[in-house]
């Protein structure tokens, strides 16, 4: 089978490199273009950035010339966008209008009501919003988003609990890794041996995106989940892996055993679709007293499985636990690639 | 005025050194003895440990011989205990029986009903439990405890809110510094670039000690505060300073402005007693979007002021904010010294 | 072909786990026994330690029962020893006497004159010392050592320079990773944001072992290389990967171009033996101004290639450069496994 | 006595803040102006930057308005410059021409032959170059420089050895703190748990500035010291404090005891001048096996004393040892202030 050509927008950044690493030998996709901002355009990929992703350096594409980000210079039927929000606002619609399907990691269009915001294990049916989107915007292609990194990790863990029991409230504190801020991102003088209890816009994203993701598709639009989410987001001196301390009220107040049993039994609804980036068990339950830990668990399931542990009773909301996932994989590049795999699997015409 | 002689038990450890630093030139107290376990006894203090506290190395006592911890070898009318829980269980009663007043940082006796567990700004009246303690235990001296480090920091911030509004629930996630685990404590391989979401016994301490501290003295015993506390405690790669992400339900649901106003106006009830270790304003309100931070704020008020910030509405409990304090000062050595200063000020007979 | 059974002594430690990871699916060797000290013996491997190595957790042997370290409880014809020096002094001879060939990472026997101290690319002929060793000690098996971690990395880089030009002096400062001290090893309070300019015994090892490794086998014994080595060893807050700042005087004072050309052209003398752990190019020349770096380069060649860079003139000794290698692979477990592969390849009878 | 008014150029940066902290309550100097680049000009100092220096936040000047850096907007007879090299090139001559004496931390003019490059304990006589400078450049004021941070630390330790024995060669590897790169400076993703073996221009500065500082004033110009210096400079994940591993050849090859004795006996030649920033003993000899360490020793002598230790024989150059100093104090702000104190003491007319 011929692989589908893809362009990676913003390929030199932290998330862009993860796209390259994940797509370099992908069974469905073939990298046609690597794009970046004007400063890097024209350079070889190996000269344009320092490789910080796992696997073969530069995904084997060190000699590929980086193109400027525009449909004229770097077009493919499937586009993965690691652009920042401002660039994404301008450029992603140009790609969508030109017929490309954009799988975007940017925040720009996530909350637009005709844009699917996907955690495929939770809401693969939301992909149907693409039709409405094309109609409204007269686009031949489209935009499908993955959530904010912390939201992606949290909702992957919450989805089976919401489906099984029904969530009534979720109060979380995140402890987020430095790579989530991109490169150069956070100054060593700010974060080494320190903690910054603020990440601009993050708490709002966590609160609003969670509701959309766990919402239900009704009459061509998403009815947000009705439970309140309250988030505090902090930055900690960890390289990769966002941790979330979560307290949750579940309908019917199930026992800890019932909750853990539900998560252990949770096999991915995508498990039989043969998607490369979909772990069979999207949630890994750790039994140890001191897990999950970023250094030990962020790479679980090739970075796509969310590790959870320390399930205990909460005297206020009923249940508390820890969740952890890889912010660059389940929280960014891997999420977008999984969205694209889902879309191919669903047979949605490009 | 002659200064009161003191012995510091466990003087070579992280907290013991902070006792030495704080007491080396104290107006009320004079260090008579430095004690440690048998391995260090007989050595000069400067040989027995590496100095890691601020100020003059070894508090100027590098040549002082370290004594073994026992009332026979190292006695003074006032004793500061930085012993671990097991040693404290055995040794602190011996000191108390022999007539010494022990200001203990150990967890051993904190929850005994006749032992005052003090955050002086919050519950200086609990000191009265000492009388009951002496009667029951037939001790000529006694034991007064300061709380667990995180509890001390949290309750310092909660006390004025509880007094003014009444707390109905408190749900917290702590991010605790490495120095809280003592020396050698945590392995660099475990914590560098990582986060450990578990500290043995810590969550229980936070939940039970908070209730006792904010409880009321009635008929010679403490009636615990009635509101539920739910805690998640984590270790982060920070040297000094415990952070707490707190969500709180207050009676009457006051506005953010009322809450912040209450804390800004909060002058220490001890402010006029002239206690060296009592900051006039025990709670420092930070207005910046990204404070409090351990590196920038742990030393506020000589380590005795708790910095708070990021007051926001919580869609579930009403209020959320961050609190941060120095775990070795407000959370340990400074707390015990303040307790002793309060006791002298109160004129309680030794 | 049937694989040779191996026992891993000290399998729960940092180096032991690397042995397990490297041998779990090795074409020549099959893990028969995992041993540890009495405290861990009898436990399942997955319970006896926290897995910190790459690859499949516990090498897939989480359920294997850990045996006590003794030839009676855990014997195989090939033994990999990650024991500490004291245990190795006692136990390795028991294994050697019982007929096992011990590939040891311990320092105990490295400098014994009848024990080969191997960096196979540099001195594979030293393996012949085994015959003398068996004769003298009346052992049916034997002991072959890999060097101290820093020495292994340095000599891998120096070997082609010594062979091609002749080294006349080497003055080095190492900056060594925390994992080199084992687990729990270094306290986070000592090393986080700090540097410790001392590692006990390390400088002596670097100075004496280098001379033995680069020495020549003459009449059944090794004549040490005659040039002086001067070492300063420091510990830095890096997880894996030892860096060495090296200044070297070469005979004939070759140009920087000649030196770099020599290293770039350096193909492993083992390259055609088909050894799994032998990289074709044991030395990787980095051209970037700011490489090699531990985080980016320690894993080169599966941890077995030493990265070098920043070749410049030194106004005092003629040449200076940086070298970096993985202390747990080229410097420990990988080195011992390569030694064993070499031994099998050489057809030395067990 | 009336204090001399000073302006601090680049007051919002890491070094600028150290100037403010050191001058806020200085007996000779009084801060008249704080300047910064256009972006900060017009803001209150407390709004223009986050305070990262020790002591009272913002030196008590949080409400002072920051001026744009120019003699028209922020002039005083004494100027401390924490400008970057490019800004210093343009602005410092304007100040000097206008009659101000500029004590500069910038590299721009250090190697100009009529500019004194001072480590006052080593070469206070070089201050006389100012006369030549004024004559040549027709300046009413002038520029006096302190060295590069690492050079300042190294030469403070080398000066007494050079004077007593005569240095014949010095080969050094530095391990430099992150604060040396300013703010935001180094990305946490680059340096956390890593080491960067390159700092642009640093090795050249160390090699050339050392020769000038330890050179001799002859006939109105400095004859550089004749011995070769070879430097390798690296960045390590340490906040403050540059370490130097030094190997030195001394004339006459004195014993370790003679060298250590020389340094222990070394009382500052400035000791009787009453300069606030001049420690009586500029070099502190540490006897412990594992010192000096940045975390424990950088603040020695209020950051102005260089700690040395681990004196050993070097088989190649004769002597090796470690030196450590505070890069922001002895290596930057403190050095410039000491230069100014020396100048006042010397009675040089402004």
Image: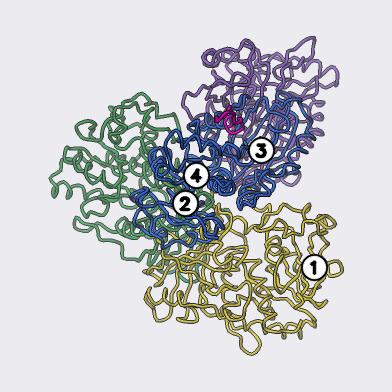
Chain colours: A blue, B purple, C yellow, D green
| Residue corresponding to mark 4 | A103
| Residue at disc 4, secondary structure | strand
| Residue corresponding to mark 2 | D324
| Residue corresponding to mark 3 | A157
Q: Is residue B22 visible?
A: no
In the rendered image, residues at marks 2 and 3 fall on the same chain: no
Residue A219 is inside the magenta segment:
yes
| Residue at disc 2, secondary structure | strand
3D distance between C-alphas at marks 4 and 3 = 22 Å
Which residue is at a point 64% across and 29% down the rendered structure image? B331
**Pointer 3 indicates a residue of which chain?**
A
Q: Nearer the viewer, mark 3 or mark 1?
A: 3
Instruction: Please identify the quadrant where the N terminus of chain D is shown.
Output: top left
Residue C129 image offset from top left, x and y in percent: 68, 83
Q: What segment is highlighted magenta in the picture? A: A210-223
* Label number found at residue C32: 1
Residue B76 image offset from top left, x and y in percent: 72, 29
Which residue is at a point 54% across and 51% down the rendered structure image? D193
| Residue at disc 1, secondary structure | strand
């Amino acid at each position: 089978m011929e692989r589908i050509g893809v362009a990676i927008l913003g390929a030199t950044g932290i998330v862009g490199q993860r796209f390259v690493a994940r797509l370099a030998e992908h069974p469905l996709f073939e990298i046609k273009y690597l794009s970046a901002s004007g400063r890097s355009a024209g350079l070889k990929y190996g000269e344009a950035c320092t490789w910080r992703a796992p696997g073969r350096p530069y995904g084997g594409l060190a000699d590929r010339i980086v193109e400027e980000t525009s449909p004229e210079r770097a077009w493919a039927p499937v586009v993965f966008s690691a652009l920042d929000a401002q660039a994404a606002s301008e450029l992603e619609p140009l790609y969508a209008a030109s017929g490309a399907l954009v799988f975007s990691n940017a925040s720009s269009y996530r909350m637009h009501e005709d844009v699917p915001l996907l955690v495929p294990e939770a809401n693969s049916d939301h992909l149907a919003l693409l039709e409405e989107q094309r109609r409204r915007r007269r686009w031949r292609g489209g935009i499908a988003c993955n959530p904010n990194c912390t939201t992606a990790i949290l909702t992957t863990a919450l989805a089976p609990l919401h489906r099984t029991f029904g969530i009534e409230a979720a109060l979380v504190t995140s402890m987020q890794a430095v790579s989530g801020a991109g490169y150069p991102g956070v100054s060593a003088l700010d974060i080494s041996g320190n903690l910054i209890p603020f990440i601009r816009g993050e708490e709002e994203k966590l609160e609003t995106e969670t509701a959309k993701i766990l919402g239900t598709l009704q009459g061509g639009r998403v009815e947000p989940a009705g439970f309140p989410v309250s988030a505090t987001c902090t930055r900690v001196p960890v390289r990769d892996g966002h941790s979330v301390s979560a307290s949750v009220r579940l309908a019917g107040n199930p026992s800890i055993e019932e909750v853990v049993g539900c998560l252990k039994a949770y096999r991915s609804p995508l498990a039989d679709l043969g998607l490369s980036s979909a772990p069979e068990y999207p949630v890994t339950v750790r039994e140890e007293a001191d897990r999950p830990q970023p250094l030990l668990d962020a790479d679980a399931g090739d970075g796509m499985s969310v590790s959870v542990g320390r399930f205990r009773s909460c005297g206020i909301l009923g249940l508390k636990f820890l969740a952890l996932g890889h912010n660059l994989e389940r929280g960014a590049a891997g999420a977008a690639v999984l969205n694209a795999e889902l879309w191919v699997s669903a047979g949605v015409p490009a």
